[in-house]
Image: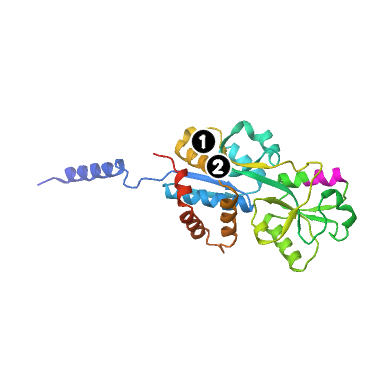
Amino acid sequence: MMNKTGLIGILLSLMVLLASCGGGKKSKEISIAYVNWAEGIAVTNLTKVILEDQGYDVKLLNADLAPVFTSLSRKKADVFMDAWMPVTMADYFNQYGDNLEYLGEVYDNARIGLVVPDYVTVNSIKDMTKDKARFSGEIVGIDAGAGIMKATDQAIKEYGIGYKLLTSSGPAMTASLKKAIDKKKWIVVTGWTPHWMFDRFKLHMLEDPKKIYGEAEKIYSIAWKGFTKKDPFAAELIRNIHLNDEEISSLMTAMEEAQNDESAVIRAWINEHSKLVNSWIPER
């Protein structure tokens, strides 16, 4: 008969064996930072679901733009899917670029500028002065730290239009736009493409003869410097994520109509674009 000491020894050996076999194998963890901009929310949630299907534990971190870049540079967040260059976020790359790395090009036809409903007869920023009263002398903006807000401050000065730029958020801006359109009131907002509001409403972007808002921009996925070496599979997967006009438009529209069920909407979109999504997944 086995003595008590022997039995305890066997039990301890079994516990060590189970632990070493990794019975509770942990999935890799990735954190994705994002700001409350429609295209970023959509692409971030798409990336989250794809990574989760590859066995990752994904954490989303919502913040304003400045904290996002600070977190990436300090490795407090891993990835950001909504970096606009060469104009909108140039200041942040000048400040933090040495601690960041580009992963891939998410979208290649982005633009920022001032946007009005189609019933507004103004077509150029230089002509906004004469209709200042109809616009209540205000431009409805978004987050204070956004590149489009800095560009708009510059536009107000260089065009000499004398408008007041209101700080709000992406969702608050679109809510103000909808409210004005419902009443057929004149309104001008800081806007950008891609954005679902161009599918929902009839809008046009004001001409910018001085090119203060730049030409078409590109949206990149970025990470802290060295992330690719740490997780080459995730880096390659994210690098492969690229959307054309139709794809990003359908994704954003679906997300805007999600009503707090983002995962279900994303999975439905993935099912409809399975060939595309599968082409992004690297071989292990």
- In front: 264, or 200? 200
| Residue bearing the label numbered 2 | 79
CA separation in Å, label 2 and label 1: 9 Å
Q: Could you tell which of marks 2 and 1 lies nearer the N-terminus? A: 2
Single out the residue that lies furthest toward the right.
Answer: 130
Rendered location of residue 183, percent (x, y): 77, 68
Whether residue 262 is situated above or below residue 12 in the rendered picture: below
Which residue appears at 49% of the width and 38% of the height?
235
- Is residue 158 rendered magenta in the image? yes
Q: Amino acid at mark 1?
A: Phe
Which residue appears at 57% of the width and 56% of the height?
250
Identify the magenta region.
152-159
Q: Is residue 81 left or right of residue 184?
A: left
Rendered location of residue 78, percent (x, y): 54, 41
Task: Using the image, tell me which numbered label, if any, was put on residue 227.
Answer: 1
- In front: 42, or 277? 277
Single out the residue that lies furthest toward the left.
Answer: 1
Q: Are marks 2 and 1 in contact (CB under 8 Å)?
A: yes
Q: Main secondary structure of the magenta part?
A: helix
